[in-house]
Image (cartoon, grey):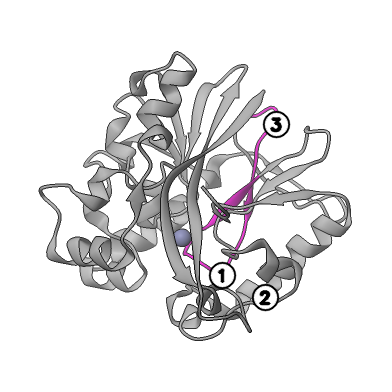
Amino acid sequence: MKIVFANSAWVSAAERLILRGGGWQKIRLRVRYGLILHPQAGPVLIDTGYTPHVTTGARRSAMLRFYGAVLGPELVEAGQPMSVLARFGLTPRDIRTVIVTHFHADHISGLPLFPNARFIASDAAWSRLKARTARQNLRHGVFTELFPADFETRLDGLSAMRQIPPRGDVPGGADLFGDGSVIAVDLPGHADGQFGLLFPEMDRPLLYAVDVQWLLKALVENRTPGFPARLLAEDFTAIDRTSAALRRFLAAGGEVTRAFRSGPR
Ligand SMILES: [Zn+2]
């Protein structure tokens, strides 16, 4: 099994917004997503990153246009799903599974690109989303207009999957492909129903911890940013608990990677 991470776009933010005690200087962050080449499930996407559906889509609502204008993601052509798949001789029609770690725009933006895919996501979070109005969902940072119309019929919910128990500081969760190779680990705090992906069979167990913290430094040094990150979080108090669990996983020899990653071009 091979796992590749790609950079869909760049966003920048003042360091202090993403790191407690950080400075005013802007940090450039990669908005990543992943591709798993799984021996049985075939090519599987982990989220989609930002795609033109968010930045230039002609049918965007006023709120989505505003969001795109404020955040200003700069799309990376070579890192868009189409380009990355082409490097592996694949097209979007070859993708049979997209794992949707949570419902923020930078994770679901490109779902309409994959007509043959089933979607693995939290069915509990999807039920809560459906019970809310569009305006309430916006307060949770969810643009319902970005979901394909048939999302629900293509949804494979986590709740029906076999659960693998934790082993010491290595977390457990839903066994996505029934072979123990990819496990969905609950990561409460940042977004409703958010989960990360544990790859326990790597030489060093790898946990893709999505958006628990934007900077690895904030995780390792226990520097969760305060306001306004507090306002944006689904459950702010859970972020520190989740971060502490990730630090224990690191201390036990695990490796953590994230959806956002800072660094030069
Ligand atoms: Zn998010």
Q: Is there CB contact under 8 Å for labels 3 and 2?
A: no
Query: What percent of the width, then of the height, locates residue 236?
Result: 55, 79
| Element under disc 3 | loop
Give the class, few, some or many, for how many residues have Cα within 10 Å of label 3's Cα (few <14, many ≥20).
some
The magenta span reads 177-197
Residue topped by disc 1:
189
Which label is found at residue 181? 3
Q: Is there CB contact under 8 Å for labels 2 and 1?
A: yes
**Separation of residues labelled 2 and 1 (CA atoms):** 8 Å
- Kindly indicate the quadrant of the structure image that contains residue 151: top left
**Separation of residues labelled 3 and 1 (CA atoms):** 25 Å
Q: Residue at x 26, y 60 (%)?
A: 68
Q: Is residue 56 left or right of residue 204?
A: left
Give the class, few, some or many, for how many residues have Cα within 10 Å of label 1's Cα (few <14, many ≥20).
many
Q: Residue at x 59, y 39 (%)?
A: 161
Q: Is there CB contact under 8 Å for labels 3 and 1?
A: no
Q: Is residue 199 left or right of residue 261?
A: right
